[in-house]
Image (cartoon, rainbow, N blue to C red):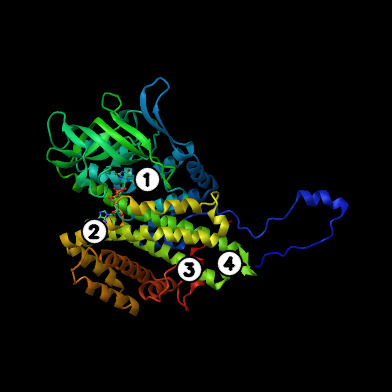
């Protein structure tokens, strides 16, 4: 298909009005990518769901895919971002209210997420495929709008930590897991469902929470489940209208984890004051804030002085969701780029038929497939935590995957934007939003270096995690010569522990690549697996997307990735 050429005629008097009103015909522009099914139009996702044990959720996922691709749902995402949350300190009578006002479309998106169990399903109905099904839904929903997924994730992730304190879990769990969304700013005991946030980071120490200065004073008895008053500040608190937060504060015996509701049991406002909202470059539909705690009442979760091991259970889950979210950002970018290039011609033929563009598109699709395969394999590991191999694998695959997948996303988003050309930079296209969102997952919930250090910590504390990781990767041994060599070299490099920290990024990069290659080789799509091994395991010197070697079946990879609308 080539772009129609302009034709010249003679402008007569009788024609002039008509021609002046109709200046040109709009041609060579793609149809909007909407009213399509995000599940049915995603071959890699369907394969992953089947492979990782969630086949029985197929119909549910199809229905959810249709909802996520509906133009009305897509519109909610744009509106939630075009209308940033507004912070009101006081009501008109001068009472301190600390209320953040969100656009109705934000609440609608939250409603969709909570009614579909994105915050609850694997805890409420654990078992085969539970995490995989939820991950697939989250993957689709996050493509529509990623920012509101932050409180969805935090609510989901809080459950393992809250369960460490059974008396508090008895009070909160059923309302956390309720599949409904109650946006009202009311004391939590008046609500049938609640949302949970987290407050760890302070000005003087983010990654290093040991530097936290917020103090916890016992109100009466001390210890797990007891009430404390918290005094201090938090430098980053996202979704500050959550009904309660898991907070780290220094108790007499050390840094401890607390559950802090926004209201006291007597129905008065807990003295937790929002100072201001962060002025963020991305993730703008979600509010993030700075707060001061002025004697806020909170209850200790887990042992005093063991705050980090308690909250780390929540953090492990938020890190997993960062992987889903970044994989989803890549998927939406690939869908936009392949869709555009399928409908856009330049220099006489469709962009998606031109070899150089094919190389770029296939490379972007490959990155997304690898990210998805890794994420969904980890989802299956989470579904099988009573199996020792799966437990060890999840421990190590979480920081490796969080680091790698989130870090690969910003350049991926930019490159997909470039496939669309100038229109890809415009705010009525989703690409600027995907681009601005893309670094956030890499930075919060433990930035890149922190993930690499956590990988080393896991290996040093529990060397069996590395055995499990290599055992899992080694499942593909013999399938590809390049893979076998890469794996052997990496295993060899782990025998030298000198300068471990300095070399951590290189080691973790290669761990991620070897696991992705192993999964793709075993997943059975030869075009995808061959291109991945050729471009990621054997260096040809090129650093940018579009460096797939000759002989790659780019057309097959693109075809799998291209959504068909209408
Ligand atoms: C949009 C947004 C929302 C957020 N929401 C929340 C929230 O709701 N709750 C919350 O608690 N926090 C939240 N955060 C905070 C976030 O988790 C922190 O910003 C993050 O953990 C990094 O901490 P920091 O900013 O203090 O950076 P620092 O800890 O100062 O780190 C700076 C850099 O140094 C690196 N680094 C740190 N230690 C080492 C080391 N030993 N060796 C090598 N490199 C190292 C880090 O990887 C990072 O790249 C949010 C952040 C953002 C951007």
Is mark 3 in CB contact (under 8 Å) with mark 2? no
Q: Which residue is mark 4?
A: 351
Whole-Å distance between the Cαs marked 2 and 1?
A: 24 Å
Position in image of residue 513 (x %, y %): 33, 68
Left or right of residue 318: residue 23: right
- Queried on whether the Cβ of the residue with tag 2 lies below 8 angstroms from ligand 1, the answer reads yes
Mark 2 secondary-structure assignment = helix
Q: Which residue is mark 2?
A: 453
Whole-Å distance between the Cαs marked 4 and 3?
A: 13 Å
Residue drawn at (17%, 64%) of the image: 463
Is mark 1 in CB contact (under 8 Å) with mark 3? no
Position in image of residue 490 (x %, y %): 26, 72
Please identify the quadrant where the N terminus is shown. Answer: bottom right
Is mark 4 in CB contact (under 8 Å) with mark 2? no
Q: Which residue is mark 3?
A: 362
Position in image of residue 191 (x %, y %): 34, 31
Lower sequence index among marks 4 and 1: 1
């Amino acid at each position: 298909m080539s772009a129609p050429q302009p034709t010249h005629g003679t402008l007569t008097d009788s024609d002039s009005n008509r021609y002046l009103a109709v200046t040109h015909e709009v041609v060579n522009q793609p149809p909007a990518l909407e009213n399509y099914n995000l599940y049915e139009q995603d071959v890699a996702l369907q394969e992953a769901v089947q492979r990782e044990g969630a086949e029985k959720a197929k119909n549910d996922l199809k229905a959810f895919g249709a909802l996520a691709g509906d133009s009305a749902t897509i519109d909610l995402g744009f509106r939630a971002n075009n209308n940033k949350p507004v912070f009101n300190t006081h009501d008109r009578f001068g009472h301190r209210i600390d209320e953040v006002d969100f656009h109705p479309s934000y609440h609608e998106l939250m409603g969709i997420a909570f009614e579909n169990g994105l915050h609850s399903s694997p805890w409420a109905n654990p078992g085969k495929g539970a995490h995989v099904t939820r991950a697939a839904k989250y993957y689709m929903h996050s493509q529509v709008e990623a920012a509101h997924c932050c409180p969805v994730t935090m609510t989901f992730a809080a459950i393992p930590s809250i369960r460490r304190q059974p008396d508090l879990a008895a009070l909160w769990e059923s309302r956390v897991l309720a599949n409904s969304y109650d946006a009202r700013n009311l004391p939590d005991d008046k609500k049938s469902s609640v949302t949970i946030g987290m407050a760890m980071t302070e000005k003087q120490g983010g990654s290093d929470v040991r530097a936290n200065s917020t103090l916890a004073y016992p109100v009466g008895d001390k210890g797990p489940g007891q009430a404390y008053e918290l005094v201090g500040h938090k430098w980053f608190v996202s979704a500050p209208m959550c009904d309660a937060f898991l907070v780290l504060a220094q108790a007499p015996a050390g840094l401890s984890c607390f559950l802090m509701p926004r209201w006291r049991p007597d129905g008065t406002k807990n003295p937790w004051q929002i100072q201001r909202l962060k002025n963020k470059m991305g993730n703008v539909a979600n509010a993030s804030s700075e707060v001061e705690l002025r004697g806020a009442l909170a209850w200790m979760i887990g042992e005093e002085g063991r705050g980090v091991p308690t909250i780390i259970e929540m953090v492990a889950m938020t890190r997993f969701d960062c992987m889903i979210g970044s994989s989803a950002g890549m998927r939406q970018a690939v869908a936009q780029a392949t869709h555009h290039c399928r409908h856009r011609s330049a220099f006489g033929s469709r962009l998606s038929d031109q070899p150089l563009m094919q190389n770029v598109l296939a490379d972007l699709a490959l990155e997304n497939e690898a990210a998805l395969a890794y994420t969904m394999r980890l989802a299956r590991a989470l579904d099988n935590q009573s199996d020792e191999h799966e437990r060890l694998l999840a421990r190590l695959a979480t920081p490796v995957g969080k680091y790698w997948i989130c870090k690969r996303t910003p350049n991926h988003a930019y490159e997909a934007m470039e496939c669309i050309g100038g229109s890809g930079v415009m705010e009525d296209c989703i690409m600027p939003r995907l681009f601005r969102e893309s670094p956030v997952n890499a930075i919060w919930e433990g930035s890149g270096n922190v993930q690499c250090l956590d990988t080393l910590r896991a290996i040093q504390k529990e060397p069996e995690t590395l055995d499990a990781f290599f055992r899992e990767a080694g499942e593909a041994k013999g399938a590809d010569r390049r893979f076998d060599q890469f794996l052997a070299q990496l295993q060899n490099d782990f025998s030298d522990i000198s300068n471990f920290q300095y070399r951590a990024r290189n080691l973790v990069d290669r761990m991620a690549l070897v696991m992705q290659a192993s999964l793709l080789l075993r997943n059975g799509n030869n075009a995808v697996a061959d291109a991945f091994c050729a471009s990621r395991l054997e260096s040809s010197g090129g650093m940018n997307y579009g460096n797939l070697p000759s002989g790659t079946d780019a057309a097959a990879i693109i075809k799998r990735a291209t959504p068909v609308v209408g």
